[in-house]
Image: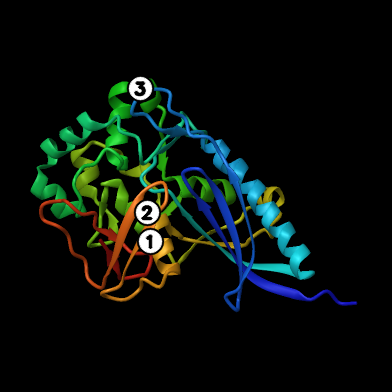
Amino acid sequence: MKVKSLRCVLGIDIGTTGAKVLLVSEAGNITASADAEYPLLTPRPKWSEQDPETWWEATVSATRNCLDKAHSITNSKIEIAGIGLSGQMHGSVFLGKHGEVLRPAILWNDQRTELQCREITDTIGLNKLIELTYNHALAGFTAPKILWLRQNEPEIYTKVSNVLLPKDYIRYRMTNVLATDVSDASGTLLFNVAKRKWSDEMTQMLAIPREWLPDCFESTVISSYVSKESAKTLGLPEGTPVAGGGGDQAAGAVGNGIVLQGLASCSIGTSGVIFWHLDKPAFDPKGRLHSFCHAIPGKWHL
C-alpha cells in the first residue's frame, strides 16, 4: 500500500523560555507542534544570559517530537517544503574564528549596558543616531552589548569573529551559514532601517568590525539550506531551504494578519508589545518608539 504524503512548512521559534516548533500544511492547517524549555541565567543583578547550546538542544528535541507527532496523527510521509525561523530579538551570540561560542549569549532583557548606551548617544549624537537607525540606544539592543564586551571582557572580545542574533545561531547550526534578516537586524542599533541594510556609519563610529555582522536577507528569501550533518541530527531532509525568517514580533504579526497600513496588534508574552504596520518608513523624532523593518519586503512597523 502506497503511503500518502503531506507537504508542510516547518516553523521554529527561539523564545526567551523555550523553543517552539510548528508544522503547517500547504492548506494552512496546523499539523503538529512541540516545544522544549531551557533555563535563563542571571549570574549577577541586571544580567540575563543563556547558553546557545541549550537553544540547539531544545530545537533538536522539539523538531523531532513535532515530526513524530505529525507522522502519528496523519499516518503520512511528511515532506518539508521549507523552514522559517523566528526568535527573541537583540541578543548577542559571540562566535570565535572556528564558529565556537565564546561566552553565554547576552539577552534582550539584560540591563548591564546603561553606560554603553550613554556612550553611544554621546558619540553619535541623539539626532544622528535616530536619523541613522530610527531608534535610540536601549540596554536591550545589540550594539551596547558589543561595547560592553570590549570594555569588560577584552580577552573574549579579541577572539570574536562574528556576532549573531539568537535565531541566527540556530540557522548557523542548521546550515553552516552566517545570516540574518532585516526585521531582526533592525534591533541591533547597527542597521539602517530606512535603507534595509547594515549601517557602515554606525559600525565605523563605534569601531565595530563590519565583517562581524552576517549577510542580511529579506525575511521571505531563502538564506541557506540544511546541511547533511544537521539533517541527520534534526530528522530533516538534507538541502531543505531555510528562509530569512524574522524577529519574533514581526513574524507573529504576519501570522496575525498585520500586513496592511492601519492594522495593529498587541502581544503579551515575556514582554508586552504593541505592533503597528507601516507602508513607509517612519520614526519618532524623540526616540520614544521603536521603528523596525517588517518581515514583509518593503514594509516597516512601529
Mark 3 residue type? Glu
Q: Position of residue 129 (x, y in %)?
A: 15, 47
Disc 2 element:
helix
Residue 254: x and y, percent? 41, 68
Left or right position of 242 against 123: right
Residue found 52% across the figure and 51% down from its top: 171
Which mark is in front, 1 or 3?
1
Mark 2 is on which residue type? Asp
Let me know if residue 200 appears in the view.
yes
Side (left or right) of 29 relative to 93: right
Which numbered disc flags the more N-terminal residue, 1 or 3? 3
Query: How far apart are the alpha carbons under marks 3 and 2?
Result: 25 Å
> Is the residue under label 1 in contact with that under label 2 (CB below 8 Å)?
yes
Residue identified by numbered label 2: 184
Count the marks: how many? Answer: 3
State the residue position of label 1. 250
Task: Give the residue drawn at x 24%, y 41%.
Answer: 138
What is the crowding at mark 1: few (fewer than 14 residues within 10 Å), some, or many (at least 20)?
many
Q: Earlier in the sequence, mark 3 or mark 2?
A: 3
Q: Which residue is mark 3?
A: 153
